[in-house]
């Protein structure tokens, strides 16, 4: 028997001093949420977000098919 994971979205919300990462299904129901983190302790540059995206989309228990970056 094969299990098919739902398609999911990875969303980054980057503020002046904060970073929040979360995963939703395609209906925007939150599946996982990192919470709001101090961006001084986390790399929220373009390269840093690229690295987070690569790491999170490679995890086999998520089926991330879309990434959204909200920068405020």
Image (spheres, rainbow, N blue to C red):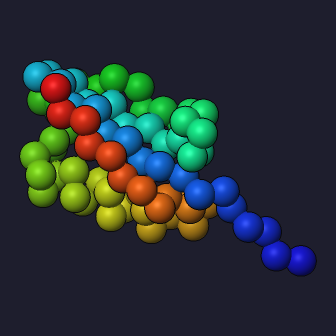
Quadrant location of the N terminus in the rendered image:
bottom right
Residue sitting at x 19%, y 38%: 42
Give how far across and how far down residue 6 sits, in percent: 66, 56
The furthest residue to the front: 27
Give how far across and how far down residue 23 sits, in percent: 49, 43
Residue sitting at x 42%, y 56%: 66
Quadrant location of the C terminus in the rendered image:
top left
Give how far across and how far down residue 47 sits, in percent: 12, 57
Residue sitting at x 12%, y 29%: 40
Q: Is residue 49 shown above or below 4?
A: above
Give how far across and how far down residue 45 sits, in percent: 10, 46
Res. 7 image quadrant: bottom right
The furthest residue to the bottom: 1
Count of numbered circles in the view: 0
Res. 29 image quadrant: top right
Q: Is residue 47 shown above or below 24?
A: below
Q: Indicate left or right for 52 with 48 as reference.
A: right
Q: Indicate left or right for 21 with 50 as reference.
A: right
């Amino acid at each position: 028997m094969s299990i098919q994971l739902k398609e999911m979205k990875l969303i980054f919300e980057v503020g002046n001093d904060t970073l929040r990462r979360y995963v939703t299904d395609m209906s925007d129901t939150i599946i996982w949420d990192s919470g709001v983190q101090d961006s001084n302790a986390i790399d929220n540059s373009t390269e840093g977000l690229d690295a987070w995206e690569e790491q999170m989309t490679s995890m086999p228990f998520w089926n991330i098919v879309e990434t959204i970056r909200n920068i405020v």
